[in-house]
Image (cartoon, rainbow, N blue to C red):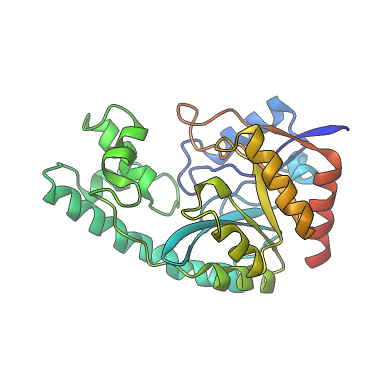
Amino acid sequence: MSEMLVDLQMHTTCSDGAWPKERIFDEIRAKHLELFCITDHDTIAAYPVPDDLASRCVPGLEVDTEHAGHTVHLLAYGVTSDDTPLLTALRKQREEREVRMKAIVERMNGLGVDVSYDDVRTQVKGGASVGRPHLARALLAKGIVSNIQEAFDKYLADGEKGFVKLKRLTSGDIIDLIHRSGGICVIAHPNRLREPHHLEEIYKLGADGVEVVHPTATPDDEQRLYAFADERGIVTTGGSDFHAPETHPPLGVRIEKARIDRFLERVAAIA
């Protein structure tokens, strides 16, 4: 069974990644990725890609949603315009991220942590939407934590002392908006879902696929997720979820060519 070297989830400084899009493009060329997608959070600001990479690219983005009171990340593939219903709705969610970050900073100050909103904004590159990774980098820059993971484990992960819930659109709302915008919806890193049964529930809301290959998925997880997708006739994808070289694996994952072909057919069918 022939495989392809692809990466259908990666992030740039247009959202919460550490590398500007040009650096990511250089890496895509160096790794000879056969298919890729820049999936910045809530934005398609990294597009269009350079002409020499266009034939290897499926446009997309990652969207934070809420299901049953918990965070669910969805990947939208095939959405190409800022004027679509999805991107219009996400501009409002972007404003909510600013409100939320100010609330997190206030909570951190209440815990005796000396960090300001300006410290966080310093970590935001380009037109990126502010997020928890930016605060984590601010804490690291100030020597308050020794690495990014410590910032999340100690303060920023769901349920920790510095966590403030983001006002999000529901998974069902976003799936509908993705479809209305000419895209398909893939459930991102399902191992991070708070409850295992949420995978079936989100599929039933209309998701078109599931991200199988991901740093959080073991070979056993991959087998289980491939079986889940195949039983329901939905597509399968994978990616490095690259944000920064010190915290994420290098670009590129291997997936059977037949599965990538099905994914591309699905994107083309709805576009």
Residue at the spot x=67%, y=62% of the render?
79
For the C terminus, the quadrant is bottom right
| 197, above or below 147, in the image | below
Residue at the spot x=56%, y=29% of the render?
249
Image side of residue 93 versus residue 229, left or right: left
Residue at the spot x=55%, y=60% of the render?
198
Residue 125 lies in quadrant? top left
As rendered, which of 96 and 24 lies closer to the eye?
A: 96
| 253, above or below 170, in the image | above
Where is residue 203? Give x, y as percent. Answer: 65, 63
Image side of residue 204 versus residue 115, left or right: right
As rendered, which of 51 and 115 lies closer to the eye?
A: 115
As rendered, which of 201 and 133 lies closer to the eye?
A: 201
Is residue 44 visible in this depiction of the protein?
Answer: no
| 101, above or below 191, in the image | below
Is residue 64 visible in this depiction of the protein?
Answer: yes
